[in-house]
Image: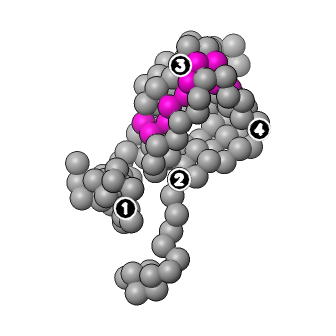
Amino acid sequence: MGEQADRLARGEWYLDDEELRQRRLECWRRLDSFNGAAADDDAVRSRALASLFGEVGDGALVVPRFQCSYGHNIRLGANAFVNANGFFMDDALITIGADVRIGPGAQLMTALHPVDDHRRRRE
């Protein structure tokens, strides 16, 4: 794991680099499979989510269209439900418990740009 990915994993301020860009690209490829599946092809969507998320509980359901940054930091509990057009910026862990319902267009974002350190922002 490179320095920036390590910083990201520790929840520290990080800069984008080639490794993180490649991780997002791989995530987006899996999302293409999930979001592009036929309306009645639950098996394709289930496999895509299982390969993408850190954990998917039994009976969990995500309605397309869905977007996320990396995928592996998302944990869905049993019977969790995420309605259409969800966006999870999973730069840190996002845990959705069992039986939780999330409405359409929800955005869960774990990243924050530094706003107080003006010197660092200029760099």
Q: Amino acid at mark 2?
A: Thr
Of pointers 1 and 4, the one earlier in the residue sequence: 1
**Where does the magenta region start and end?**
72-81
Residue in the image at 58% along x and 44% along y = 88
User: Label 1 to label 4, Cα distance in Å?
Assistant: 30 Å
Instruction: Say whether disc 3 or disc 4 marks the residue closer to the N-terminus.
Output: 3
- Inspect the image, locate mark 1, and give the three-letter code of the amino acid beneath it: Glu
| Near-viewer residue (101 or 106) | 101
Q: Earlier in the sequence, mark 2 or mark 3?
A: 3
Residue in the foreground of this view, choosing between 13 and 100: 100
Q: Is residue 54 left or right of residue 80?
A: left
Q: Which residue is mark 2?
A: 110
Residue 62 relative to residue 84: left or right: left
Residue 89 point in image, percent of width and height:
54, 49
Give the main secondary structure, helix, strand or loop, of the magenta stretch. loop
Where is mark 4, residue-wise? 104
The percent coordinates of residue 18 (x first, y second) are: 31, 56
Residue at point 64% right, 18% down? 79
